[in-house]
Amino acid sequence: MKARIILFVLITYIFSLSANATPKYPNQAPLPTKPNESKEMPSNSSHTIERTTVVEPDQKASDSAKYNEVVEEYRQYLASVKPEIRDEIREYRKEVLKINKAKTAVYKKLSQGAQEFLAKERALKKKLPIRDKKAFNKEAVS
């Protein structure tokens, strides 16, 4: 639970940084969002260099707005959930955590060869389309 909260705070912080990417000083030019957007071009004078930036539609602002909208929708949904349901979900997550710890303990008891076999099998299954994974499992059993 703490890990999810920390992850949520970290994601929120990262999005707030990208949304607030404004210049710190009034005379400072905004930073380009892509490496090739800033081009230095010589002006008529031989001593000055003019800096121009290409401005494209701000995708990050719209992504940030969508993110904030989803977060607000999630908060509203959480407020509407009954306390009994929240308690039930907490208990469910605790039980799943216990099961995952038990699975990890059983996996660690396997020999190195068995662990390598399972890792190779997992890698091969990832390469298969979803419909072929069931056939793969049937062949492995027989």
Image (spheres, rainbow, N blue to C red):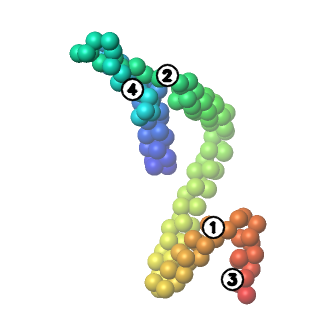
Crowding near pointer 3: few (<14 within 10 Å), some, many (20+)? few
Q: Report how far apart the C-alphas of labels 4 and 3 lie in the structure.
A: 58 Å
Cβ–Cβ under 8 Å for marks 1 and 3: no
Q: Nearer the viewer, residue 59 or 53?
A: 53
- Tell me, for residue 127, which label it has, or none: 1
- Residue drawn at (58%, 61%) of the image: 96
- Tell me, for residue 140, which label it has, or none: 3
- Residue drawn at (51%, 77%) of the image: 107
Q: Which residue is mark 2?
A: 55
Q: Quadrant of the C terminus?
A: bottom right
Q: Nearer the viewer, residue 14 or 125?
A: 125
- Tell me, for residue 39, which label it has, or none: 4
Q: Report how far apart the C-alphas of labels 2 and 3 lie in the structure.
A: 56 Å
Badge 3 amino acid: Ala
Secondary structure at badge 2 equals loop
Residue 105: x and y in percent read 48, 74
Along the polypeptide, which appears first: circle 2 or circle 3?
Answer: 2
Q: Report how far apart the C-alphas of labels 1 and 2 lie in the structure.
A: 40 Å
Along the polypeptide, which appears first: circle 4 or circle 2?
Answer: 4
